[in-house]
Every structure is written in C-alpha cells, then in structure tokens.
C-alpha cells in the first residue's frame, strides 16, 4: 500500500523530501519538502515531448499527491526562470492555489507566461530579493544567489526545527559572470558552519571533469568571431540566457553591427530583463523586420531554435520560409548552446539544412561559443567542502548522473549518500536519511487545449495508429440479418489505396465472408459479436497482407 493511500502526513520532529518529478530525469522538476504537517513545493517545471509522444509538445509531473493536500501546501518557491523549473505553473497552479515566492526577474518571466493563460491577478506572487529571506509556514528560507545561465538563480537553504536542507537548484561557480554577481562562497561556508543535514544537488554535469567555464570566455570568443565574418551572422541560444544576449550585443557593437531578435520568446525574456534592470547599457535590439533591411555585413540575428524545434525561428530560416528574414550562402550560424539529450537528431537536421544551402555552421565543438550553466566535478567538490552536509541526495539528472554524483560525494567524505526516486518519501532528518514511503507519480501531457495522463487510453491509441495505421469498416445489415451491400473499408497510414486496390478488395471480401459465416441469430441480435467478427477479420486480413494490425473501427448500421 502506498503512503498516499495511508494518508501520510509529515510530523513535527522530522524533515522529509519527496520528488514528484526531476529525480532520475532532466526536466519536470517538482519537489516537496514536508515538516510539521505542511508541505513546501520547490519548482514546478516541464519537459518536452519527443517522437514517442505523437501530438504532444509539453509534459510535466502529475501533482496528484499534493493536489489532494492543497490545504497543507504553504507555498511554491521557484529557484529560477527556466522552463524545466517554472514552465508548469501556468498549467497546474489552478489545482494548487498556493502563493508563489521568487526573485524579481523570475517573477517578471512568470508574469509574462501567465498573462497568456489569463491568470494575471489570480496568482499571488511574492517577490523576494535575490539572496533574500522569507518564512513560509514552518519553513525558514534563505536564498543564496548562484551563477547560472539565467539571472537570479537561487540555491535554497531550508531551515526547520528538525534540521536544515540545502536545495541547490541549477548552479555553477563562474568566477567572471557577465551579468549578476558571483556565487558567494563565504555565505556557503557560513551555512556549512551552521550545519547542513542534507544537500539536494544538481547532478547534470557530475560526469564532466574540471570546471564548467565562464561566460566571460564566451564573450571573448564571440568578439573574436564577429571580426572574422563579412556576411550576416546568426547566433542561436537559449532564450533565457540574458548573459549571452548581452555578450552578442557587446560583440556586435565592437564590430559596427546591429542586433535583431528573431523569436517571440527572446523578446519576452528581453522585456522581463529590462523591467528589472538588466540589459540597459547595450544598444536597443532591432525587430526582425528592421534587421532584415540592414546590409549583410552590419547585421547580427539572435534566434530561437537552438534545440532544433520544428516551428522555431531558426528552423524557418534554415528551410528558407521565414516571412521576414532570409539567409544566403556565405552567412554564418553560431550555435551558442548545447544539445539537450534527446535533441541531437533534430539539431543535426537543422545544421545539415544550413550547410546544404552554403551557410557556415559553428558549434561549441569547434569554438568555445558556449559554456554550461551546471557544475562540473571540481565545482561539486568545492560545494561539498563548503557545506559539509551529513547526507548527499543527488537530483536533477538522469540515473547515471545521480550515481556518479553520489560517488563523488563519497569521495568528498560525505557520511551518507542516498539517491532519490520520484515518488519516494525520504526522511532527511533526524538521524540517517531513509525512505519511509512511496506515493503515486505520473506524467501529464498538454494535448491541444487539455491536460491528459501520458499513459491514458488516448495516447495508447495514438501510438497504435502511429505504428500500425487505422482501418474503418461500415457494415449494413437488414432485418433478415443479411448484408445489404458490400462492406465499405477505408484505411489511414496503412497502404496506398491507389497503388494497392486489390488489398482493399481482399479486406472487403474478408469482412463479408466473416459476417456471412456468423449464425443468423448472432447477425440478428448480437451487435457486439457482429462488430467483433468484422474487426477481427479486417485485422487478420491486413496482418496477413501487410504484417500490420491496424487500429480498427466498425460502424454497424441496421436497416
């Protein structure tokens, strides 16, 4: 029996951690901390669908466990403004109804997103200064500003009467960030001196040796590269990377170029950044309409689509069907990003399209045009040295990343390591960390205008159609149980009707013979049996002729 069925409640003397998403995977972060009968949520993010999820672009963790306890949910803290940490708020907040706490930049990004969903004015967003403090129910939260690939990323120090946990969020140690301050190592050391029972940390780059690199190095590289080209320059990056936007603007200005933003999400992030004081010392960005009229040697375009998204600005530029801007042979596209696991093929397709058109492509494999926003092994080791937690609980990474992170923590002399799994309740304190229960977890998919379980019947049917096609047969039976005409058969995604007319004729004959061989009483009285016989005959026919068992629909008409 699972702990949600048992009615689990966090007691006054312990601190619990429950990930519903983001443990053993990258994306869909949804974390719960429990203490004194209350729950605190940290992050509420999304991930993106792939070819195994036809018709689905966005997926997220199912919050059913905490939805059933929404009266005990004291708040949601967002660590930063990336989609995998806040992208599900617009879809799920109405089920939770709790106040949200975050920094000004993240709040600005969130407001622009919820405006599109008509939630402005309904959601109470409390802005907490970067590196500020706030008390939410029985949880005292101290935010610690950390460097990342988005402004105002915050690690959270979560203090309770039972103990203190540190939730790192996404972070790195950038000694020379171009936007915002460096990670305050003195503050981290002070927190370590005060005592940390558990560190729940980013594992994305736990397998990467050394250091993640600095945004200043990327800026220097872009400044150098921009001086080498005489035609149009395109830079594609994550829209939320405000540091990269500033670096592109600085590099362009140095070489007498103007910068245009191509893609709605870039403008949304730019406006959010400007609203809270960032990007105010650089020249104004041009619209995609205005930048299209600049001479090629004066134009720089920043585009969305670094992950090969099929409807992005870069995808349209690569295919030559963007309504405002076009690329020509001799132009260059700089991929100032990394491929998120699973997107490699889509990114390669875009790059191949560009190269075929005579457009030069530069990636981080050739030049240092990107650095990760996540800590490599040396940075992780330093964090353990500063915080000295009793327990290391790696999160935010695939299983292989979590295991490697746990090994590194052991090398750093952390007394205990435990690898969280989605749905497992961990007691972090007092005493050794241990699993104390399991709750239901699942995935929700944005399917058009609705949310559906990813394992719902509609998705299973869509999978079957994708792999086997669909077949439809209409059977008309009169009052004597006789077919009044030949069955009508239509198929989708199974065969070429014009090229294979005999296949349809064979299917029609198969259904007609199957129905004719049924007992007369069945044909007269048992609709379900008649439909099943027609369905089986049709599927068996296509299995024999094409090796496929299509999703089959039978329309029975009695006259």
Image (cartoon, rainbow, N blue to C red):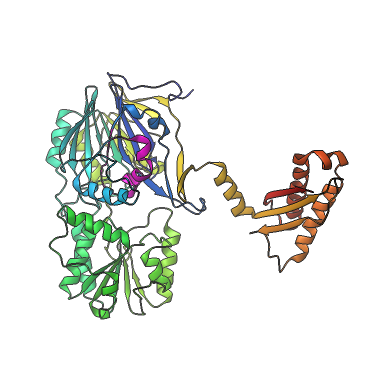
Residue 387 shown in magenta? no
Question: At 15% from the left edge and 29% from the top edge, which residue is drawn?
Answer: 194
14 vs 322, left or right, is left
251 or 138: which is nearer to us?
138
44 or 1: which is nearer to us?
44
45 vs 50, left or right, is left
- Classify residue 119 by image quadrant: top left
Question: At 69% from the left edge and 51% from the top edge, which residue is drawn?
Answer: 549
Question: At 12% from the left edge and 40% from the top edge, which residue is drawn?
Answer: 186
Q: Position of residue 211 (x, y in %)?
A: 24, 51
- What span is in magenta? 75-98
Residue 96 shown in magenta? yes
249 or 268: which is nearer to us?
268
14 relative to 67, above or below: above
- Residue 152 in sight: yes
Q: Position of residue 145 (x, y in %)?
A: 18, 44
177 vs 305, left or right, is left
Q: Position of residue 424 (x, y in %)?
A: 40, 30
188 relative to 359, above or below: above
Q: Position of residue 137 (x, y in %)?
A: 23, 27
476 relative to 366, above or below: above
Question: At 23% from the left edge and 62% from the top edge, which residue is drawn?
Answer: 245
- Residue 419 in sight: no
- Classify residue 273 by image quadrant: bottom left
């Amino acid at each position: 029996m699972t702990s949600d069925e048992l009615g689990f409640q966090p007691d006054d003397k312990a601190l619990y951690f429950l990930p519903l998403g983001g443990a053993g995977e990258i994306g869909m972060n949804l974390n719960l901390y429990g203490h004194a009968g209350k729950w605190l949520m940290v992050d509420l993010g999304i991930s993106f669908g792939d070819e195994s999820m036809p018709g689905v672009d966005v997926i997220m963790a199912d919050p059913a466990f905490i939805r059933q306890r929404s009266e005990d949910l004291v708040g949601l803290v967002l660590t930063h403004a990336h989609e995998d940490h806040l992208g599900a708020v617009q879809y799920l907040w109405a089920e939770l109804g709790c106040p949200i706490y975050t920094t000004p930049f993240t709040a600005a990004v969130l407001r622009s997103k919820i405006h599109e969903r008509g939630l402005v004015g309904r959601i109470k967003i409390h802005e907490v200064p970067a590196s500020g403090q706030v008390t939410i129910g029985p949880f005292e939260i101290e935010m610690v500003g950390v460097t990342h690939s988005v402004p105002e990323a915050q690690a959270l120090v979560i203090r309770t009467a039972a103990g203190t946990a540190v939730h790192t969020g996404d972070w790195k140690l950038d000694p020379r960030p171009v936007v915002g301050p460096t990670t305050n190592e003195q503050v981290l050391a002070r927190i370590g001196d005060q005592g940390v029972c558990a560190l729940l940390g980013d594992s994305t780059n736990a397998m990467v040796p050394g250091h993640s690199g600095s945004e200043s190095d990327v800026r220097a590289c872009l400044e150098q590269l921009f001086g080498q080209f005489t035609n149009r320059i395109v830079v594609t990056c994550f829209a939320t990377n405000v540091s990269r936007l500033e670096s592109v603007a600085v590099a362009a200005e140095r070489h007498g170029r103007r910068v245009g933003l191509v893609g709605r999400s870039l403008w949304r992030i730019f406006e959010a950044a400007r609203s809270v004081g960032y990007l105010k010392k650089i020249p104004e960005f041009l619209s995609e309409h205005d930048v299209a009229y600049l001479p090629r040697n004066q134009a720089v375009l920043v585009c969305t689509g670094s992950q090969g998204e099929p409807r992005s600005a870069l995808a349209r530029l690569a295919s030559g069907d963007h309504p405002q801007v076009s690329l020509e042979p001799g132009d260059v596209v700089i991929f100032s990003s990394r491929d998120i696991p699973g997107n490699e093929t889509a990114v390669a397709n875009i790059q191949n399209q560009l190269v075929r058109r005579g457009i030069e492509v530069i990636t981080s494999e050739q030049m240092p045009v990107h650095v990760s926003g996540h800590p490599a092994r040396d940075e992780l080791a330093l964090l353990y040295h500063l915080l000295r937690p009793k327990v290391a609980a790696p999160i935010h990474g695939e299983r292989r990343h979590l295991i490697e992170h746990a090994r590194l923590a052991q090398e750093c002399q952390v007394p205990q390591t435990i690898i969280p799994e989605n749905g497992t309740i961990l007691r972090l304190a007092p005493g050794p960390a241990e699993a104390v229960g399991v709750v239901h977890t699942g995935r929700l998919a944005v399917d058009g205008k609705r949310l559906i379980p990813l394992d719902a019947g509609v998705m299973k049917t869509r999978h079957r159609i994708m792999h086997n096609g669909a077949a439809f047969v209409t059977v008309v039976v009169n009052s004597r149980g006789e077919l009044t005409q030949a069955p009508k058969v239509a198929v989708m995604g199974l065969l070429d009707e014009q090229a294979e007319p005999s296949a349809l004729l064979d299917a029609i004959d198969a259904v007609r013979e199957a129905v004719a061989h049924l007992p007369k009483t069945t044909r007269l009285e048992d609709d379900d049996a008649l439909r099943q016989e027609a369905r089986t005959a049709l599927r068996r026919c296509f299995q024999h002729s094409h090796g496929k068992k299509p999703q089959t629909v039978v329309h029975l008409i009695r006259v």
